[in-house]
Structure formats: structure tokens, C-alpha cells
């Protein structure tokens, strides 16, 4: 049986939410060999302050990190919570965060563009701002959900355009020009346009890629309206999947790394729509391994294994300057089991349940 002996990995984009189910989400992450995370700040309320107890409109990084630790996250070797950029984010808040050591990253959300993103401020307002200048000076990473918001349906997604492609075309070159020292992570890239941008931008720009965007296309979502695959940015077309697969498996690449965007939703179907976010707690390394194999990588070879380890374990921590891990885990090529997560707040169905695809890898800790 093929077995990969890997250093425990970092999930550099995940969602642990708030409330009684946090412990279950965190446990599932620990059980998949995850040594550390970036826990996203689109909680209710958002994490938009640095320290102190917070209030009913805003939590602080300090307070939310404590919540994660108390729910079992103290077992992580490393925990980063980015600051949610809102209309109240000021240059002095960035200075406070940087001086305290609590602030490692900020998160840009397109207003109303995804789950709990209503506090976001448009990118056009940030470019050239004093806040972004302070990010440059304090070497705080900017994590970007790169989609143009507020578009009419026909420009939101088409065979030649998408909200993501437009955002990367229109805003990212301006952002790089205005802030030459800013370090940026393009979160969950999904399109060939975003991939090309990252590759052309050089070392100060990196990107996270999810398992679902490496494995699936829009056709998989539409065929049977398998809404567990509905996340934002939405899965795209075959040429986009190919660009992503080539980027993550490219020899020696340092810019692309794992960030699952695992996003638990206890009810996906809403009264007149669908909550955006896929859950991959418990099975992300397995899905990434399947995606590498589907891309033609031989994980039994030294080069294949090297490329996989760079993507899953090495590139992310190195971009963020995180300590290396001493613990290891095994990924074995053997039929795995998908487990539906039962929480106090409801059931959460992970990918690839319902996708006509069985896990062909399993984890052994
Ligand atoms: C995420 C969520 O549910 O919090 N949803 C998603 O579709 N990816 C938010 C996000 O990262 O966009
Ligand atoms: Zn996310």
C-alpha cells in the first residue's frame, strides 16, 4: 500500500464559526493531521477588533483566539485569526495589532459577496488608503476574497467572464502598483485569470487553493444541483480546473498552498437560495491527494511526493513565516470513509458525499 509520511500540515484558510459546534469542527481538523490554521473572521459578530472582550457588534482577535483555544484549538501548534476589514478599521488599529503581536493578517471581503461578508468595504476604497500603507509597513499579510461584488447575473458568471476574473483584471494590478511592499494571499483562487495573475505577480503574492476547486467544475454542481458543492467563488470550467491543477503541481512552485475554505453550514438550503461554503473537515488531505493523482501526478515517485508536500505542508508556512512542525502523519492509499458530522446545531455533510466519488486515501495519525 502506498503511504506518504508527511509533516503535519497547516490549513491556511478555514472557518470554525462560533457557538457549541466549534469543538466538533476543530476536532475534525485535528484528526486530519492539521497542525495549525488560519481561522477566518467572518463570524457573528465579525472579528474586527484587536484585543479586549469585544461587544455584540464586534469581537477581537484576542477574544476569538481564546474561544478557539477553549474549544480544543489549544492543540494547534499555530493559530492565526485575520482582522476583518470594515469601515471602522483604522491605521491606529493596525499599529495596535502589530505592536501586540496578535495581528498577522487582514481579510478583505467583497460587501455582500459571500457568507457573512456584509461588513466588507469595496476594494476601490482601500487602494491607496492609510490602512493599506500601514499593512505594508507592519508586514501584515492581506488575504483577499477576490470577486467583484454587486454585478448583474450576466456578468457575474459567463463562459468568458466571472466576478473573480473581473476583480483580478480590474483591481489587482492597481493594488500592486499602489502598494509595492504589500504581501498578499489571493484566497481560494478558482479561475485561469486569477492563476495567471498570481504567477505573474512574483514572490510577494501567493494563493490558497481548495480541494473542491481542484476536483470539480460547474458541471458537477449543476448536474443534480448538488448544492453541497456550492461555495464562493463558485467552481468554474474545465480550463480553469486545468490551470489550477497545473499551478499546484508545477515543479518547484512556491506560491500555491493548501487552504481548504472548509465552511460548515448546518443548513445549506435557505428559503430562497443556498448558503455558500463546502465542508471538508476530516478529509481535506485525502481530497488533495486525489486531486494530485487526477492531475497526473504519481505520488509514489519522489518528484510527485515532493510536489504534494510543498503544496500541502511547506509553501504556506514558509510564506507566513511559521515554525516548522515536529509531528508527522500518514496518508495511505486505501479506501477511506466519509463521515457526516453530527453537531449540536445540526448535521454537516462533507465533500465528496453525494459526488459519485469515494475517498481513495485515508489518514493514520
Ligand atoms: C465561506 C463561509 O461559509 O464562511 N463560504 C464560501 O463559500 N467559501 C466564506 C468565504 O470564504 O467566502
Ligand atoms: Zn472562506
Image (tube, rainbow, N blue to C red):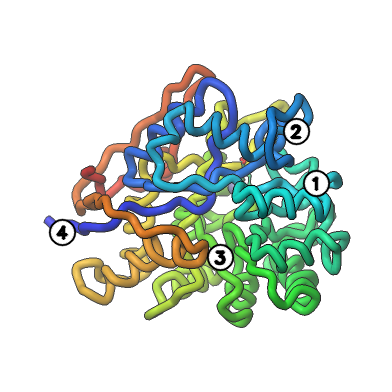
> Which mark is drawn over residue 224?
none
Judge from the rendering whether residue 12 lies leftward or rightward of residue 112; answer left or right: left
Q: Which residue is mark 2?
A: 58
Residue 89, given in percent of the width and then of the height, sits at 81, 48
Q: Mark 1 or mark 3, which has the lower sequence index?
A: 1
SS assignment at label 2 = loop
Residue that lies at the very extreme toward the top in this rendered image: 344
Mark 4 = which residue? 2
Q: Which residue is mark 1?
A: 86
Which one is earlier in the sequence, the residue at label 1 or at label 4? 4
Element on which disc 3 rests:
strand
Callout 2 touching callout 1 (CB < 8 Å)? yes
The mark lying in front, picked from 2 and 4, is 2
Considering the numbered disc 1 on the image, is that residue within a helix, a strand or a loop?
Answer: loop
Q: Quadrant of residue 6?
A: bottom left
Q: Viewer-nearest of labels 3 and 2? A: 2
Q: Quadrant of the N terminus?
A: bottom left
Sequence-first disc among 2 and 4: 4
- Quickly name the residue at label 3: 207
Q: Residues within 10 Å of mark 1 (few under 14, many from 20)?
A: many
| Residue 130 percent location from the top left of the image | 85, 62
Of callouts 3 and 2, the N-terminal one? 2
Amino acid at each position: 500500500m502506498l503511504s506518504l509520511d508527511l509533516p503535519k500540515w497547516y490549513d491556511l484558510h478555514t472557518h470554525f464559526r462560533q457557538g457549541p459546534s466549534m469543538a466538533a469542527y476543530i476536532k475534525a481538523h485535528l484528526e486530519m493531521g492539521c497542525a495549525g490554521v488560519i481561522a477566518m473572521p467572518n463570524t457573528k459578530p465579525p472579528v474586527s477588533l484587536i484585543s479586549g472582550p469585544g461587544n455584540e457588534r464586534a469581537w477581537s482577535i484576542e477574544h476569538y483566539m481564546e474561544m478557539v483555544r477553549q474549544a480544543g484549538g489549544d492543540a494547534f501548534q499555530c493559530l492565526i485569526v485575520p482582522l476583518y476589514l470594515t469601515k471602522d478599521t483604522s491605521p491606529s488599529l493596525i499599529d495596535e495589532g502589530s505592536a501586540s503581536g496578535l495581528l498577522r493578517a487582514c481579510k478583505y471581503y467583497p460587501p455582500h459577496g459571500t457568507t457573512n461578508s456584509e461588513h466588507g468595504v469595496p476594494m476601490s476604497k482601500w487602494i491607496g488608503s492609510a490602512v493599506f500603507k500601514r499593512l505594508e509597513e507592519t508586514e501584515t499579510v492581506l488575504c483577499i476574497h477576490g470577486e467583484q461584488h454587486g454585478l448583474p447575473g450576466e456578468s457575474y458568471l459567463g463562459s468568458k467572464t466571472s466576478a473573480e476574473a473581473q476583480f483580478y483584471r480590474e483591481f489587482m494590478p492597481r493594488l500592486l502598483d499602489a502598494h509595492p511592499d504589500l504581501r498578499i494571499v489571493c484566497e481560494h483562487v478558482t479561475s485561469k485569470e486569477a492563476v495567471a495573475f498570481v504567477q505573474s505577480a512574483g514572490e510577494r503574492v501567493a494563493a490558497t487553493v481548495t480541494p473542491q476547486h481542484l476536483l470539480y467544475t460547474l458541471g458537477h454542481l449543476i448536474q443534480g444541483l448538488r448544492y453541497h458543492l456550492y461555495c464562493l467563488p463558485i467552481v468554474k470550467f474545465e480550463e480553469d480546473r486545468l490551470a489550477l491543477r497545473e499551478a499546484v503541481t508545477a515543479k518547484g512552485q512556491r506560491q500555491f498552498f493548501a487552504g481548504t475554505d472548509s465552511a460548515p453550514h448546518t443548513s445549506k438550503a435557505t428559503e430562497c437560495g443556498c448558503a455558500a461554503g463546502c465542508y471538508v473537515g476530516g478529509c481535506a488531505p485525502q481530497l488533495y491527494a486525489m486531486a494530485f493523482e487526477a492531475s497526473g501526478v504519481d505520488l509514489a515517485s519522489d518528484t510527485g511526493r515532493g510536489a504534494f508536500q510543498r503544496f500541502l505542508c511547506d509553501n504556506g508556512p514558509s510564506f507566513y513565516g511559521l515554525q516548522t512542525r515536529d509531528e508527522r502523519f500518514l496518508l495511505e492509499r486505501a479506501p477511506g470513509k466519509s463521515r457526516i458530522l453530527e453537531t449540536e446545531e445540526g448535521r454537516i455533510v462533507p465533500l465528496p458525499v453525494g459526488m459519485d466519488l469515494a475517498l481513495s486515501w485515508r489518514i493514520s495519525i
